[in-house]
Image: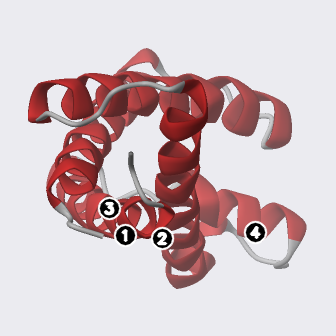
Amino acid sequence: MVSILSGLIGGLLATIVMTIFMMALGDDSPPPTAALWAKYVGDEGPESYMMQGMALHMMYGIIAGGAFAVGVTALGLGVATLTTGLLWAVVYGLVLTVVGAVFWMRVVLAMEPEPAMVGMFALFHVIYGVVLGAAVVYLPL
């Protein structure tokens, strides 16, 4: 059984690692969360809200980790081994990609992401899944 605390901590660690990859491999454009902040809270463009966007992204990642822990427990999915933990967490990362690219970007932000952007978005969420899966298996909480 996965504890919610291991999911929350795993979500934090996974978001940090994902963000490092985003910063290293990304195109220095503001994250979609900065666009969300600009559209609904601010009065300037997304580039003015990089820090708010990153804080929002960090919060989403932590909550998503907790939701993963609750979900795998509620569904009875086995994540006792590294293999199963990675499998379900990578699948979860890909689900987050679809939700992010389809719902958040297209519906909420009215953006039409380029295929290359969606590909990078998927890569970053797979990285999130790998770290999250390893964390929930190895954190003894």
Nearer mark to the viewer, of 4 and 2? 2
Whether residue 113 is visible to the viewer of this picture, yes or no, is no
The circle drawn on residue 12 is: 1
Q: Amino acid at mark 3?
A: Gly
Q: Residues within 10 Å of mark 3 (few under 14, many from 20)?
A: many
CA distance for labels 2 and 3 = 12 Å
Q: Residue at x 83, y 31 (%)?
A: 107
Residue 48 at x, y = what percent?
A: 60, 80
CA distance for labels 1 and 2 = 7 Å
Q: Quadrant of residue 56?
A: bottom right
Residue 125 at x, y = what percent?
A: 36, 38
Secondary structure category for the residue under label 3: helix
Nearer mark to the viewer, of 3 and 1? 3
Nearer mark to the viewer, of 1 and 4? 1
Are the two marked residues, 1 and 2, in contact with CB atoms closer than 8 angstroms?
A: yes
The circle drawn on residue 28 is: none
Are the two marked residues, 3 and 1, in contact with CB atoms closer than 8 angstroms?
A: yes
The circle drawn on residue 10 is: 3
In the rendered image, the vertical position of residue 14 relative to residue 90, given as above or below? below
User: In the picture provided, is 137 more to the left or to the right than 117?
Assistant: left
CA distance for labels 3 and 1 = 5 Å
Secondary structure category for the residue under label 1: helix
